[in-house]
Amino acid sequence: MIIDIIGAGSLGLMYGGKLQAAGNHVRFWTRTSTQAQLLSQDGVTIVERDEEIHILPDQIQARSVNELTDTWERMPGEWLLLMVKQTSIDDFIREISQWKDRMLNIACFQNGMGHLEKLQAALPHSLICSAITTEGAKRVLNHVHRAGAGETRLGAHTIHTEASISIESKEIFNLSGLLQQAGFDCTVSNEIDKLIYRKLLINAVINPLTALWRIPNGELIIQEDRVRLMRQLYEEALVVYSANGIRLDEDMWEQLMTVCRSTASNTSSMLADVLQGHGTEVGSINGQIVKMAQKSGRSAPTHEILLHLIEGM
């Protein structure tokens, strides 16, 4: 099976490398041709707790994403795994604008919200699948270190017609099977929306605070003042969720704290963007909670302050 990985960051390389090692034909698509050339020259090594997976340079197929549509005309793939950040979604949509009438299978691994609706509007006939994962990875040169074994949950964003339910479900289960064979804990969920809102809440509490204080995730919970602000963000988001009819697990606070402990040494994606001077995903994370608050006639002042602070950086 041909699988296209759009975005060859640490997560894209980890998923793509393990899928290739499991026998799939994987193509990596990078933002620039220089990045593709370096990947093809150096190869990639996936470092796990008990093994290393070496993808040699002559085994890597990497190209710039602006060559994607031309390549697909000659040799289309079965799945597109979209691993770019929210800030690059509009660029991707421009690249594939000529595919509006095609039926594609796209799995989206982005943080935050708003991207699924954009993609479905741009590709109305395609299967847009949400992928929620707790997998983490860190790249050091051509080595990608897997941060323990997380979970990946897949679910369809929308079902087009009654007749398409079985076809679209089959495609998603096929992708889940491929990821399982590659060594990922992957299942299909019929509660994907709940998982999306769960991850949004966790990211909205952890990411902006680590970006402002420039600390790894675990250092959030070692000082009482930090935990107090975390709790304020958490409670504020729950009020907004309740006003919008969204219900999460009763032990959501404990789950959030567990994420901080299990990813204690991780640098959040928002902190990484701030340190590198890149645009962040704060608009699709805390910004989404602010929009949900406004929609329901509420306010989320702490989230709004963080939104402006991060954007101002």
Image (spheres, rainbow, N blue to C red):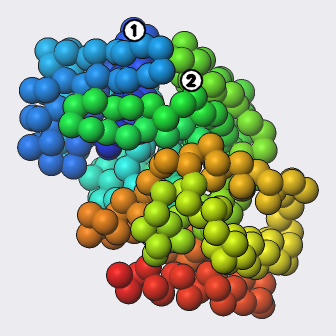
Q: Is residue 225 left or right of residue 123?
A: right
The answer to whether residue 295 is visible is no
Nearest-to-viewer mark from 2 and 1: 2
Q: Residues within 10 Å of mark 1 (few under 14, many from 20)?
A: few
Residue 23 got which mark?
1
Q: Is residue 310 left or right of residue 60?
A: right
Q: Is residue 272 left or right of residue 201?
A: left
Is residue 208 positioned above or below 74 on the image? Answer: below
Mark toward the start of the polypeptide (2 vs 1)? 1
Q: Give the residue furthest to the front.
A: 223
Foreground of the two, 59 or 100: 59
> Which quarter of the picture shows residue 221?
bottom right
Is residue 93 positioned above or below 297 on the image? Answer: above
Foreground of the two, 16 or 303: 303
Residue at (15% x, 48% y) in the render: 32
Tell me how far mark 2 sits from mark 1, CA to CA: 15 Å
Residue at (15% x, 19% y) in the render: 57
x, y percent for residue 199: 65, 55
Label 2 close to label 1 by CB (< 8 Å): no
Question: Which amino acid type is marked by label 1?
Answer: Gly
Foreground of the two, 122 or 174: 174
